[in-house]
Amino acid sequence: MTLPPLYALRAFEAAARLGSFSKAAKQLNVTPGAISRHIRTLEEWFECDLFTRNGPHIRVTDSGRALTGQLTEGFSCLERACDSLRSNRREIRLKAPSTLTMRWLLDVLTSFRENYSTPVVEITSVWMDKDAVDFSCEPYDCAILLGNGQFGPETESSLLFEEWLTPVCVPELVRQAQQNLPDCELIHPSPDRRDWRRWLKRTGKFSQLNLSRGKVFDTLEQGNLAAIRGHGISVGDVLLSQEAISAGQLALPFNEAVATGESYYLVWPKDTTRRDNIDLFYHWLKGAVPRNEQENIDWLR
């Protein structure tokens, strides 16, 4: 099937997305008159109006609206494909959750850069309600995600380490937590309070603990920081809290740690052109996984 001129499709998509011939012209570095002519070419091709015009004001027609979304997605795919080939093949663009980044990954990246000049790892640390990545529309070559290892049919992944949760607090609050946790100020690292709920259910402790009270945050990192400052008893990842524990900033009031059933994985698209660099990076990450230095912990799977 013969397609309409690509330049006309590009002009229409920009004008429809921006709602203005002038803005489209500025983005594409052409004149507004050129945008208008390109769209006329397209309207003649399809034999229908793509815009209604009222002086300087334009509005996308139903026919134009049906075309817009698919064109925007199509041009985005083309831009990503070109960017993938044009960008530095010695660079890895990494997406990672905020707590993992602050508690472990930044130091690992520093040591990686000290040992390897390439690939250069460019990290974007983000808060994710649910750890996920869509390589078809996000500008990343790989990601570190917390999950069950299933991140979509178009991806591959390798395990880094499991998530184990346990209460954490400053050393000064350990005895109070052990003697009467229900009277302690609780810190919830997630709005749904799932971390405390997991630990209580698996250990069978403190069945009367009121989870509706306490301070609520968005991430384990925020919960850890609040705990380090003495604001209450939080729940933390044992391995990601290890440095703070070793430094005396945090302590474990209880010796039970529970497995959440989720783990941290390095994830990448199956069709990546950077597999060798990703493999090198993964092996460095795997070798830098935090070691558990806590004795006498009862690991409850």
Image (cartoon, helix red, strand yellow):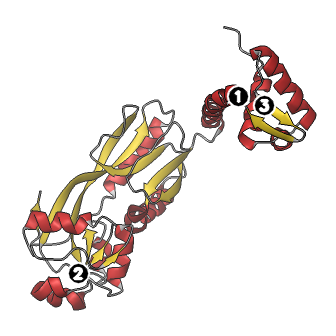
**Which residue does the image show at 18% across and 63% down from the upper left?**
198
**Which badge, 2 or 3, comes first in the chain's sequence?**
3
Q: Seen in the image, is 300 located left or right of residue 267?
A: left
Above or below: residue 262 compared with residue 13:
below
- Whole-number angstrom distance, CA of label 2 to CA of label 1: 61 Å
Picture coordinates of residue 229, whole percent (x, y): 36, 86
Q: Seen in the image, is 231 located left or right of residue 64?
A: left
Q: What secondary structure is found at the residue carrying circle 2? A: loop
Above or below: residue 101 compared with residue 252:
above
Give the quarter of the figure containing the C terminus: bottom left
Quickly name the residue at label 1.
Answer: 64
Picture coordinates of residue 142, whole percent (x, y): 46, 44
Inspect the image, locate mark 2, and give the three-letter code of the amino acid beneath it: Ala
Q: Nearer the viewer, mark 2 or mark 1?
A: 1
Quadrant assignment, res 165: bottom left
Count every numbered label the image shows and give the total.
3
Inspect the image, locate mark 1, and give the three-letter code of the amino acid beneath it: Gly
Q: Mark yes or no: residue 31 visible.
A: no
Q: Mark yes or no: residue 23 visible.
A: yes
- Whole-number angstrom distance, CA of label 1 to CA of label 3: 7 Å
Above or below: residue 243 compared with residue 7:
below
Q: Nearer the viewer, mark 2 or mark 3?
A: 3
Quickly name the residue at label 3.
Answer: 51
Q: Are marks 1 and 3 in contact (CB under 8 Å)?
A: yes
Picture coordinates of residue 82, whole percent (x, y): 65, 32
